[in-house]
Image (tube, rainbow, N blue to C red):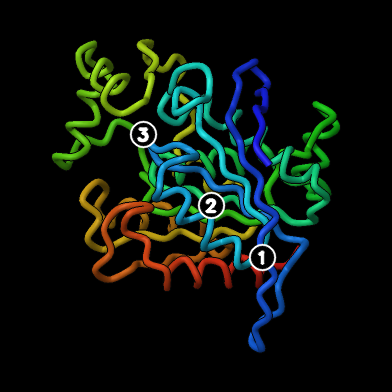
Amino acid sequence: MRTFLYTADGISIDSVYDPGVVVYDAGRPPSRDLVFVIAHGFTGDVDRPHVRRIAQAFAQYGAVVTFSFRGHGASGGRSTVGDKEVLDLAAAVEWARSFGHARVATVGFSMGGSVVLRHAALFPPEGSERGSERAGREGRTEAGTDAVVSVSAPARWYYRGTAPMRRLHWLVTRPEGRLVGRYGLRTRIHHREWNPVPLSPVEAVPRIAPTPLLVVHGEQDGYFPVDHPRMLATAAGDHGELWLEPGMGHAEHAATDELLARIGDWALSQPG
């Protein structure tokens, strides 16, 4: 099923729902109460082959919602590179819950990995202490998640310590870079700088507890070295789990089928 969702600030988000497949495995029964909501990396979109591969892998474990962040693919608006994208993810999670699934696991890659962390901090799940507090203030907690997986995410903003990140900053901050993004990468990037600067991933992580958190990062990541996931794991304390993957590079393209299967099993094992 494919539709356009609308965010709290009125942006249209191209979204796809896959009910998943029933796979009978003696080691684990299929879960029909779990839905994965996939947050892609910068310049991805719902139709990219690497995003479809991720969706197909998790469809063996539950239903799957994929979507294109604002400014990407057929979605409206312009990318804010991880700031307002939390509203896109919130709309996708609310839509996923509308199909009757009891549990939502958000799984984000690179930029999407930072978004799932910030989203979990800002939108606590219904029934939690934080969710009850939020519901009392704002009257809605349907956008909260029950488990969070962040893959290849940065811990802090404005990182320029690697060549790929220096290229990305040129793409985002320079007019000629944004033209390359628009016409070469199908990504429309907002020209305004952040004001105010949003909560960083490492600042968001302590606010996620007690929601289960898994941080996954490749030891050969060319964008963010391993001090980033270690900072996130330290900030998470006892409620977070860190997997440092030997030989793995960056984000969706580097995630093997075996790793995706382990993440699927981890999501299934979480209480909810």
Mark 3 or mark 1, whichever is nearer to me = 1
- The crowding category of the residue bearing disc 3, from other C-alpha atoms within 10 Å (few below 14, some 14 to 19, many at least 20), is many
Q: Looking at the image, which is closer to me, 246 or 225?
A: 246
Residue 142 % position (x, y): 78, 39
Q: Which residue is mark 2?
A: 107
Residue 25 % position (x, y): 65, 83
Q: Secondary structure at mark 1?
A: loop
Which of the marked residues, 3 or 1, is nearer the chain's N terminus? 1
Q: Looking at the image, which is closer to me, 154 or 78?
A: 78
Residue 168 % position (x, y): 24, 31
Q: Are marks 2 and 3 in contact (CB under 8 Å)?
A: no
Q: Which corner quadrant of the image does residue 192 belong to?
A: top left
Question: Type of residue at label 1?
Answer: Val
- The crowding category of the residue bearing disc 2, from other C-alpha atoms within 10 Å (few below 14, some 14 to 19, many at least 20), is many
Q: Residue at x 66, y 75 (%)?
A: 23
Which of the marked residues, 2 or 3, is nearer the chain's N terminus? 3
Question: Type of residue at label 2?
Answer: Val
Q: Which corner quadrant of the image does residue 266 belong to?
A: bottom right
In this view of the protein, can residue 209 be seen by the observer?
Answer: no
Q: Residue furthest left?
A: 163
Q: Which mark is residue 43?
A: 3
Horizontal placement of 179 versus 59: left or right? Answer: left
Q: Residue at x 48, y 50 (%)?
A: 52
Horizontal placement of 232 versus 15: left or right? Answer: left
Q: Secondary structure at mark 3?
A: loop
**Mark 2 and mark 3: span between their CA atoms?**
17 Å
Q: Which residue is mark 1?
A: 21
Picture layout, residue 71 above or below residue 47:
above
Quadrant the N terminus occupies = top right
Question: Type of residue at label 3?
Answer: Thr
